[in-house]
Image (spheres, helix red, strand yellow):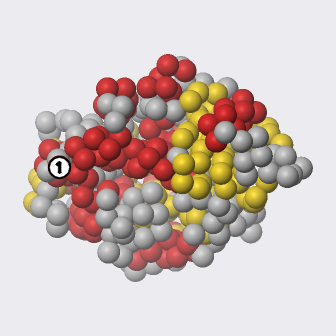
Amino acid sequence: MPDFLFPYGKGFLPYTVPASRFRGEMVSRLHRYRPAKRPEELVDESLSHPVGTSPLHKLAEGKRRAVLVTSDHTRPVPSRIIIPRMLAELRRGNPSMDITILVATGCHRETSPSELEAKFGPEIFRNERVAVHNCDSPDMANLGKLPSGGDLVVNRLAAEADLLVAEGCIEPHFFAGYSGGRKSVLPGIAGRGTVLYNHNARFMAHPAARAGILDGNPVHDDMIFAARAARLAFICNVVINAEKEVIYSVSGDCDAAHREGAAFLSARCGARRVEADIVISTNGGYPLDQNIYQAVKGMTAAEAAVRENGVIIMIAESADGHGGEEFYKTFRDEKDLDRMLACFMKTPPENTRVDQWQSQIFARVLRRAGIVYVSKAPGGMVRDFHMAPARSVGEAVEKADAMTGRKDASIAVIPDGVSVIVT
């Protein structure tokens, strides 16, 4: 019988799938990919051989003020490895350069000092200037209009920098195609209204707004436009495996380098669909499974494999609870999913509600399958999200069996729903 250890927070939950019920495993080739070189070597090599632009130290020559955009506490970017090397390159080009590290929170909550120190390490946290983006700050810069028609408003520190650069991680993204690259600007350091407009209902329903798709994806089109308008000059992005180890790094132009990284990932992250009555998925453990909001990503991988009216078992520790007050209220206060989705589709882009995009995608998943949610989140909260709560995988399978009305329902497994594209 196949034994699994499912990522859960900073640990794992075990479960043995009965052999008679097991239909298969959908796993990215990168899930257990071992790096050929040390992470530091991979990052150094990419910084030395950038794609589509000059090396970072050359770009820094003659520049007075730089802003280095970094990911926030919800992303598994190995900043302790990337940031020191990017800082060294900037200062190699101009030793007296004024540098600010800007944490791209998007519309997430503010990253706490303890989370920043854990992310960067004590030396960078104490010795470098770090600012945390606030999407609701009144002190923002308007850079014009997005192709979709929305206002492009970004953090003033970034807009007024002589040199804007960013780190990031490239993973499949359930509506932007891939994370990383241009996402450091939009949604990373954009104003709330800009993010809401870009994440509108029409875009979320677009057939090209899916994992693995960039060309023709209207969400991506806005994002790359925003990155160019903000003059994002250089990125260093990595690809990681299930152990959060760097297995690939690419640096250079925010579009050309990102596409090269996405191509590397795309060739290795696909898994053939295994249809089953019950599909078990995860969000890859910490830091991506801190709340229910983020866990929707792992659910969309299972959505592609579960039979209609089947059951998804989603494993996500969710120690931070729901992850979005409006996201939570939407499902607590509206029990009719068809009515909810119809309301979203009638909402003009400029009136997009906070977290509406996540609610729209989550409602789409719920319409296809029931969900049993394995987490530390309060059971009442989980039920408010139209899901059944469970504390172990075994309990979740028992509940899934009851929902299907069968004891022999087939089971498929997705060990990391964030890292794989089910094809």
Query: In the rendering, at what x and y percent does residue 365 appear?
Result: 46, 48
Give me the residue at 36% from left, 64% from top: 209
Instruction: Please name the residue shown 32% across and 44% down the image.
Output: 338
- Percent across and percent down for residue 189 are 29, 48
| Vertical placement of residue 73 versus 219, above or below | above
Identified at 13% across, 36% down, the residue is 138
For mark 1, what is the residue? 346
Quadrant of the image occupied by residue 356: top left
- Secondary structure at badge 1 equals helix
Q: Eyeballing the image, is 221 above or below 124?
A: below
Residue 240 in sight: yes
Which of the pair 140/214 is nearer the observer? 214
Which one is in front, 185 or 66? 185
- Residue reaching furthest to the front: 405
For this view, does 219 lie left or right of residue 72? left
Give amino acid for label 1: Lys
Asked whether, in this view, residue 196 is left or right of residue 36, the answer is left
- Residue appearing at x 29%, y 40% in the figure: 340
Q: Is residue 50 above or below residue 269?
A: below
Expressed as whole percent of the image width and height from the top left, the position of residue 390 reads: 64, 27
Asked whether 55 or 205 is in front, the reply is 205
Disc 1: CA contacts within 10 A as few (<14), some (14-19) or many (>=20): few
